[in-house]
Image: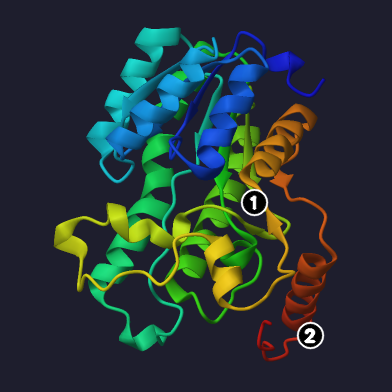
Amino acid sequence: MAGEKFRGKTAVVTGGASGVGRCLCELFARVGMNVIMADIEQAALEAAGSALQEQGLSVEWVLADVTDPESMQNLESRSRETFGNIHVLCNNAGVGIKEAQRRIWTLTPKDWEWGFSVNVMGVANGIRAFVPGMLAHGEPGHVVNTSSTNGGLYSMPTTPIYSSTKAAVTSMSEILHAQFRMDGAALQAHVLFPGPHLVNTNILSSMRNRPAQLRDNDEPVAYTSMADLAKASGIANMQLTEPEEVAETCLAGLAAGQFWILPPSKSNDKQLTRRTESILRRQNPELQA
C-alpha cells in the first residue's frame, strides 16, 4: 500500500479546507498520518476538520494565511506543539484571478500582487517556516508544492497571472530539489501537477478570499466550479478530474520518491513536447490550444 510508509508521520496541508487540499488531508489521515489542516476560511476549515475528526481520523486545524510570514511561522509552531516533528509539507493553497477575457497589459498591480502573494509567496513562506525544522530533526520528509500544467509546463494565453505564478512554483521546486541534494538532506522536494484533466474544485470562485485592499472591483465571478464552466460552455463530455484522484496520485508519487508528480496524459505530453521542441529549435512559440 502506497501510504503504509507514512503511518504515524505528520503532514501539514495549506488550502486544506476544500478541493485538493481537503482530499489530501483525508487521504493522509486514512493511511494513519497525523494531519494539520490549514486554511484562511475559518468556517470551511472548522466544518472540514470536524467532519474528519468525527470519522475518528487524527486531524487538527489551524487558521493560517499563507501570504503572511508570521501566520506561517505560527502554523509551524502550532503543528509541532500538536503532533511533534513534521514529515510532509504540502504548499497547496492557490487562487485564480478573473482574467480569462483580459489582456496581460490590462491587468492591474492589485491583480498581480494578489495572485503572486498566494500562489508564489505562499509557497516561499511555507518553505521558510517549515524546512529549517524539518532539516533539524533529520528524519526523512517531503515538501510538495502544487503547480499546474498551465504555466508549470506550458502557458495558456487566457491566464497570464495564474500561468506565471505556476511557472514560478515549478522553478522554485526544481531549485529546492537541487539544494536538498547539494546538502545531502533527508528531505525530498516534489512538484504536484493536478490532473490530467481540469480538476473539479471551486478555485474559480477564489474572489471570496481576496483581501479588500487588493480588490479593484466586486463583479461576481461567472462560475464557481469547473463543472459549472463545463455546463455553461455546453460541453457535455468535458472530462474532469476529481480532487480525490489528485490526492491519490500525490500519495503514490510521494511513496515512489517522484519529483515530477504528473499523471499520464497524451494531451499534456503533446503540449509539452511541442513547447520543448520549439525551444530547442529556436522557433517562435505556437498558440496553445
Question: Which residue, given by chain and number where applicable, does mark 2 sit on?
Answer: 281
The N terminus appears in which quarter of the rendering? top right
Which residue is painted at 34% across and 27% down in the image?
A: 46
- Callout 2 environment at 10 Å: few (<14), some (14 to 19), or many (20+)? few
The C terminus appears in which quarter of the rendering? bottom right
Left or right of residue 55, residue 120 in this image: left
Question: Which residue, given by chain and number where applicable, does mark 1 sit on?
Answer: 194
Mark 2–mark 1 distance (CA, rounded to whole Å): 29 Å
* Residue 79 found in image quarter: top left
**Nearest to N terminus: mark 2 or mark 1:** 1
Residue 91 in view, yes or no = yes
* Residue 68 found in image quarter: top left
* Residue 20 found in image quarter: top right
Which residue is painted at 71% across and 35% down in the image?
A: 248
Q: Is residue 165 above or below residue 12?
A: below
Tag 2: residue type? Answer: Arg
105 or 173, which is in the foreground? 105
Q: Are marks 2 and 1 in contact (CB under 8 Å)?
A: no
Question: What secondary structure is marked by label 2?
Answer: loop
Q: Is residue 202 above or below residue 86?
A: below
* x, y percent for residue 23: 58, 35
Question: What secondary structure is marked by label 1?
Answer: loop
Q: Which mark is residue 118?
A: none
